[in-house]
Image (cartoon, rainbow, N blue to C red):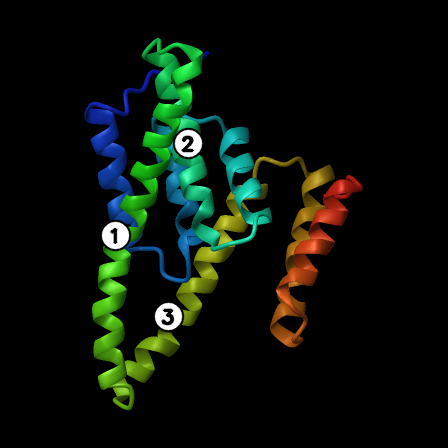
Amino acid sequence: MTPNIDLLGAQGWDLFTHMLALSLMAIGGAIVVAPDMHRYLVDDHGWLSNSEFNSAIAMAQTAPGPNLTFIPVLGWMTGMHSAQSLGWPPQWHWLMALVGAMLCLFAILLPSSLLTYGATRWAHRNRDKVAVIAFRQGLLPVVVALMLSTAWLMSAHLSWAYGWRAWLLSVVVAVLIWKTRIHLLVFLGAGALLGFMGWV
């Protein structure tokens, strides 16, 4: 069943403003706000299914580039559903999908980019002050906790028979990243291979 959504109306504005707010919470990268995006898009509005949401993150994370590429993919999928619910002809669905992708991308980039620009200039001028040093060190546990909540979200729907392997792999990779200097592309490649073999 196609979800009822109109990105050209109030629902599009609601999605835009929600992504604007999430932009300011994306400390450590956009992936840390994935749980709230899931709540908003899947649980609250039903605009995407759980599998569509997870597929968007998986596709974007396997592609080269910044980790926020899953956000325009979520917007693209939402736009496709919007075009279907509005009754657009199939050959024009890509246009509404593009609207959804750009709406989400600009909303997530604009506030954080402006804030980062201003804060970086200020922090650079005051980099030796105790408060700035303490703030940087205090953000570390926040980022780790937000990353763990994303990992939990992506594997919570898995059965124990399957999910324990994903959790074990997550813990092993986290420890290896923390304790070694192995390049992240090695972990991405290993994850792709394990997924291809059906282990996770």
Residue in the picture at 23% in, 63% down: 115
The residue singled out by tag 3 in the image is 139
Residue 103 in view: yes
Task: Using the image as rendered, state which of residue 60 and residue 46 is in the foreground.
Answer: 60
Q: Along the horizontal axis of the image, is 59 left or right of 25?
A: right
Residue in the picture at 43% in, 35% down: 74
Q: Residue furthest front?
A: 91
Q: Nearer the viewer, mark 3 or mark 1?
A: 1
Residue type at mark 3: give it.
Answer: Leu
Residue type at mark 1: give it.
Answer: Leu
Residue 3 in view: no
Dot 2 alpha-carbon crowd within 10 angstroms: few under 14, some 14 to 19, many 20 or more:
many
Q: Mark 3 or mark 1, which has the lower sequence index? A: 1
The residue singled out by tag 1 in the image is 110
Q: Which mark is residue 76?
A: 2
How much space separates mark 3 and mark 1, taking CA atoms? 21 Å
Q: Nearer the viewer, mark 3 or mark 2?
A: 2
How much space separates mark 3 and mark 2, taking CA atoms? 32 Å
Q: Mark 3 or mark 2, which has the lower sequence index? A: 2
Residue in the picture at 24% in, 26% down: 11
Residue in the picture at 44% in, 12% down: 90
The kind of secondary structure element at disc 3 is: helix
Dot 1 alpha-carbon crowd within 10 angstroms: few under 14, some 14 to 19, many 20 or more:
some
Q: Mark 2 or mark 1, which has the lower sequence index? A: 2
How much space separates mark 2 and mark 1, taking CA atoms? 18 Å
Q: Are marks 2 and 1 in contact (CB under 8 Å)?
A: no
